[in-house]
Image (cartoon, rainbow, N blue to C red):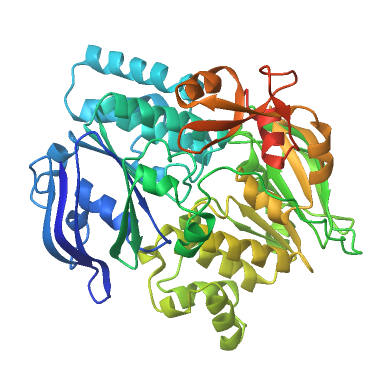
Amino acid sequence: MISFEYVSFGYDGSRETLAGLNAAIRPGECVLLCGASGCGKTTVTKLINGLIPAFTPGCRLEGRVEVDGLDPAKTPMHQLARKVGSVFQNPKSQFFNLDTDSELAFGLENAGCPPEEIHARVAETVEALGLESLCGQSIFSLSGGQKQLLAFGSVYAMGPDIFVLDEPTANLDQEAIARLHDEIAGLKRQGRTVVIAEHRLYFLTDLIDQAWYIRQGSLSRRFTREEFQRLTDEERERLGLRTLSSAPCTLPPAKPAGSGEGLSVEGLTCAFQKREAVFRELSFSVRPGEVVAVTGPNGVGKTTLSRCLCGLLREQAGTVRLHGRPLGRKERQRAAFCVMQDVNHQLFSDSVWGECRISAPDAPDEKIAEVLDRLQLLSFRERHPMALSGGQKQRLAVATALLSEKPVLIFDEPTAGLDAKERIRFRNVISSLAADKIVILATHIVTDIAYVAKTVVLMNGGKIIKTGAQEELCSDISGKVWEITAESDKVMEYMSRMRVSNAVSDGSKYTLRIVSDNLPEQGAKTVQPTLEDVCIYYFGDM
C-alpha cells in the first residue's frame, strides 16, 4: 500500500509544488499520473522513492507518506530501494557504470547478492525484456531510447515490489513502446505495483487501475480505467491531455519551399568514438520554407546525425553544404543550432533569463521577454534551469534556439517531455520558423511529423531506406493497411502475430488497425494509410 495523507510540498522560497494530496494506491495497481508539464507528477514519484526529502534540502514537506509500512523520509535509501525501483525521466542520471552489462548487474552487486544469483537474474532480465542487442555495449554509444530500456532493465533485475516510472516513453519508438506495454502488463500479472507519470496515454488505457489528474499541484480528478477510457475528445483536450488512442492524423497540405538552395547532405558517413559507422553515405536536402523530419527506430542514428550536422561530431566521409557552399565542422557550429535530446547538456546559466542571454548576448530585453512569453516561461525568468520540470527545460532550450538567429535549426526529439498543449505550441513554433529558416526534426513521434513536416526521411540499418513527401510515402503502401474487429480476449493474440498500428476499444470489442502485405483475416477491410502506418510498415518488424 502507498498512501498520501494530506501531503504538501514546496521548494524553499517558491510556491507549493504539491498541495494537500490525499489518496492511496493498493498493492498490484497500475496508477497513471497525468497532467501538464510542471503540475507535480515527478514530485509524487520522488515522494514514493524517497528522493524527496532526502535530496531536497530546505524544502517544505507536510503530511504523511507511507510505502508498504515505511516512511520514505525516515527510511535509509538502500533499504527503500529493495521495495521501490525507479526509472527516471533522464535515465543517464541513474547510471553508475561505463558498459551495459555492469549496469544491469550494479544494483544486485550493491545489494550484496552472490555472483551466481547476479548472473542468473541478469540473464533472466535480458531474456524477459529482449535486451540482447544492448549487451556488451558502452553506455555512451546508446541512443536515448536504448538508455531508457537499459534503465528499466537495471530496475527489473532488482525485482522490487513497486515500480515508479517517470516519462518512460519519452525517448522510445513505437516498437519499444509496445514492448513497454507488454512489460507493464507482465508486472501486473506478477502482482507488482506500477506508478507511471506519462504524457503519452494511448498505450496505457487497458493497463491502468486509476488515473490521477494533477493540476497545479492539486489532485484535481481521479478516474477508474473505465471512466478514463470514456473521456471524450472535448474533455481530454480541455484537460490538456494527449490522445487516448494512436489515431491517425490528417495530413496537412504541403507548404511551398523557399527560393534558396538550402542545406544539402551528400554521402555522409559518421561513426561514434571510432566504432563501426552508425550510418553510411546519407544524402538528402532541406530547402528554406520546409521542415524535413528524420525518423527511424531507436539506435538508428538520428541523434548522431543531428550532432554531425551541427558540428558536434566529425564525419568520416561526405559533405554538408549550405546554399551551395561546403561547411566544415567549425562552420557548421556557427551556422546550426541543435536542441538536444537531453537538454540538460545545453543549460549553463543560473537563471532562465541568463540562459537566453548566453544565446543572444546582443538581443534587446524586449526580444527575450517576447520569446519567453511565447513559450510560457516569462514567469520563470529568475528560476534556475535545473529547478524546472522536464517539459519546461525543453521549452527553454527551444527559446535559446529561437534567440540564436542561426539559419539552420535542428531539433532532436524536442517534444519528449511536453504535454499535449505544449506539443501543439511547439508545432506552431516550428511551422513559423520554417518560413525563413532551414529546419530538421529528428523524432520517432509520428504525430509531430505529420503536422509540420513536408518531407520525411526514413532511416534504418545505417542508411536511408525511403524519403519523400508524406502523401507519397502513404501512397506507396496503399492497399496494405486493414481494419478488423476483435473480441477483447483476442487482442493480445493478434498483437503477437501481426503488425498492429492502433487498437481502439468501445468497451466490449476492439477495432484493430493492421499493416500487412496480404489480407490478414477474413472480413478485414482496407483503409487509407497514414504516416504512422508507414513507419509500422518499414520498422514494425525491427
**Observer-nearest residue: 500 or 311?**
500
The quadrant where residue 229 appears:
top left
Q: Position of residue 470 (x, y in %)?
A: 79, 45
**Observer-nearest residue: 345 or 326?**
345
Query: On the picture, is 299 further left or further right than 81?
Result: right
Q: Residue at x 66, y 66 (%)?
A: 428
Query: On the picture, is 390 further left or further right than 210?
Result: right
Q: Residue at x 68, y 54 (%)?
A: 310
Quadrant location, the C terminus: top right
Vertical order, 150 against 432 (above or below)? above
Query: On the picture, is 68 further left or further right than 250?
Result: left
Counting the numbered discs, the total is 0
The answer to whether residue 11 shows anywhere in this view is: yes
Q: Position of residue 57 (x, y in %)?
A: 18, 63
Q: Position of residue 405 (x, y in %)?
A: 69, 72
Query: On the picture, is 144 further left or further right than 20?
Result: right
The answer to whether residue 469 shows anywhere in this view is: no
Vertical order, 95 against 491 (above or below)? below
